[in-house]
Image (cartoon, helix red, strand yellow):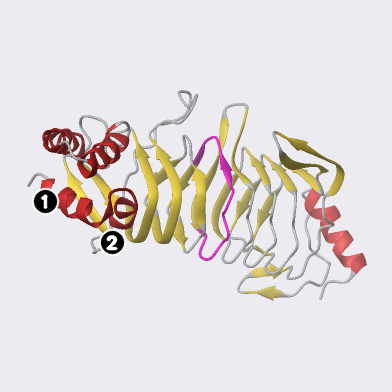
Amino acid sequence: MIGESLNLEIWNRLIQDKSLDGLSLPSKDGRLDLNGLDLPDPLVIRRFEFKGRPVSEIEPGVVIRGAKWQNLDFSGSRLRGMRLFGCDIENCRFDDCRLEGLRMWSMSIRDTSFKGADLRNSALGGVQDGTRNVFVGIDFTDADMRGTVYKAAAFDRCLFRNSRLVKIDFQTSTFTNCRFEGELNDVLFYRRGFRGETFPANEMLNVDFTGATLHDVGFRGLVLDRVQFPSDDEHVVIKDFASALDRMTETFTHLGDATAKKLIAFVRMHRKWAVPNQVQGVVNITDLREVVGEEGVARFLAAIPH
């Protein structure tokens, strides 16, 4: 366990981007072992309501600018409310860390693990002076990413396994060579998000969802030609997505009953964001059933063009 005086000295050096040499810290798997490092919780300045919701205005626990952290193991540390600007993080571990409320801008994070980390309500997609955060070779296995916020970020070779992706809007974040496993619930992927014209478009290159369950997951303005979707009873993958949805709408329009009207509404919701050259799309059968019922599911599956 890191004592109070050592804890303070470590933070002084980390903030000032100074070496941790001479502190007699143990090593673990080639990294300095900072297990149990403690950052005081952010100070709550005031509490108020905004549009009926409780809001806390806080003073961040620590602000770090331009630091270069390499080969550090923060596993099990309390690091709530950190503010990081223009830092480089490489070959580090934040496994099982408490990182709620983390804020990042203009960051480069490479070959680093956040396994089991609590990242709730963190801003991982912050942008400063037009520069987005870059995540390369990151393991988010079992991380709690609920409520994380994005304007734009780059994710390359990242693993999202059981990462509690719930109510996430990735905006103009790009994904390349990434894998998603476990449940995604109410998640949005865009080619370009709101006011995202100045950032690279998200082409979703070599993104693997085969081990995922996609509930209310939206793909907006994306061709999806290099994406792998689940192949199971929970999902149906539809080729030539926009054209197929148009033909299905025509089929249901001719029927005219209540179930057909529900199917038309469901199809139009997906068609709104489909692009003409979209290679494929995916529909979750459970989501469909909740809207149109069992009979509607049967009609939908029968109407898919082959």
- Asked if residue 172 shows in the view, the reply is yes
The percent coordinates of residue 291 (x first, y second) are 33, 48
Marks 2/1 in contact by CB < 8 Å: the verdict is: no
- Asked if residue 65 shows in the view, the reply is no
* Residue on which the image places disc 1: 302
Few, some or many residues within 10 Å of mark 1 (<14, 14–19, 20+): few
Quadrant occupied by the N terminus: bottom right
In the image: residue 102, left or right of residue 42? left
The residue range painted magenta reads 139-153
In the image: residue 251, left or right of residue 121? left
Q: Which mark is residue 175?
A: none
In the image: residue 267, left or right of residue 184? left
Question: Residue 280 is drawn in which quadrant?
Answer: top left
The percent coordinates of residue 296 (x first, y second) are 22, 50
* Residue on which the image places disc 2: 234
The secondary structure type at the circle numbered 1 is helix
Q: Residue furthest right?
A: 5
The percent coordinates of residue 16 (x first, y second) are 81, 47
Q: Main secondary structure of the magenta part?
A: loop
The percent coordinates of residue 167 (x first, y second) are 51, 48
As shown in the figure, which amino acid type bears the numbered disc 2? Glu
Q: Residue furthest front?
A: 257
The residue depicted at 30 percent of the width and 51 percent of the height is 288
Cα gap from disc 2 to disc 1, whole angstroms: 16 Å
The secondary structure type at the circle numbered 2 is loop
